[in-house]
Amino acid sequence: MYILKSEMAYELKDTEHEIYVDAPEFLKKSDYIATVGDICTIKIFEQIREPNLAIVDLKTKRNTLLNSKQLEIIKNIGIHNIEVENPAGTISKSLWKAIKSTFSKKKNTKIITKGEEDLATLAVISMAPEGAKVIYGMPDRGMVVVDVNQQTKKRANNFLKRMLV
């Protein structure tokens, strides 16, 4: 299990990437799309296509449950569904294993976390194939698109190495 050190939390609040309110059109040309977060998953599904991997917790802003319309959209995402425990501020072994298993499957997958899914972005970037697009939500701001390449993998892996294991 990876555990976020409190002094590292501030590093995740800022991003060098552009923040989008709506899904950018260039995502339509992407071979592999992974989303982390309920609202950005819904936007990508509605505006672009079904993500290959969606990681959600059926909440928004940590404690607000999705409404019935949002839940219905989430329900329709993914052929393969996995539920895992993932406490806040962590990447649990079960979440890591679930993410890793999706890259060997050819079926769109939805992982529902009991707890939080925020840090899953790091694991997805670490394991995703180069060229994949990883989209995660920034509460009250929009969504961030990360192009998985050697540089973004290195940054994610370095961050993971600094977390408590």
Image (cartoon, helix red, strand yellow):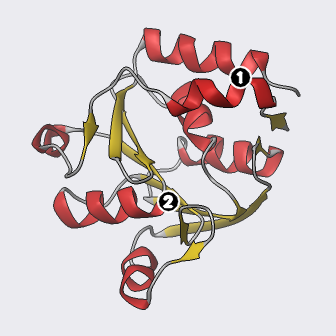
User: Which image quarter: residue 155?
Assistant: top right
Q: Which residue is mark 2?
A: 109
Q: Position of residue 99 (x, y in %)?
A: 62, 45
Callout count: 2
Which residue is identified by label 1? 160
**Relative to 62, is 51 on the left or the right?**
left
> Which quadrant holds the N terminus?
top right
Give the left or right position of residue 149, taking residue 126 as reference. Answer: left
User: Residue 57 bears which disc, if any?
Assistant: none
Amino acid type, callout 2:
Thr
Q: Secondary structure beneath disc 2?
A: strand
Closest to the observer, 24 or 124: 24
Could you tell me which residue is drawn at 46 percent across and 63 percent down?
38
What amino acid is labelled 1 in the image? Answer: Leu
User: Is residue 139 positioned above or below 74 on the image?
Assistant: above
Q: Furthest residue to the bottom?
A: 68
On screen, 91 above or below 37?
above
Residue at the image point whose x is 82% and y is 44% from the top:
93
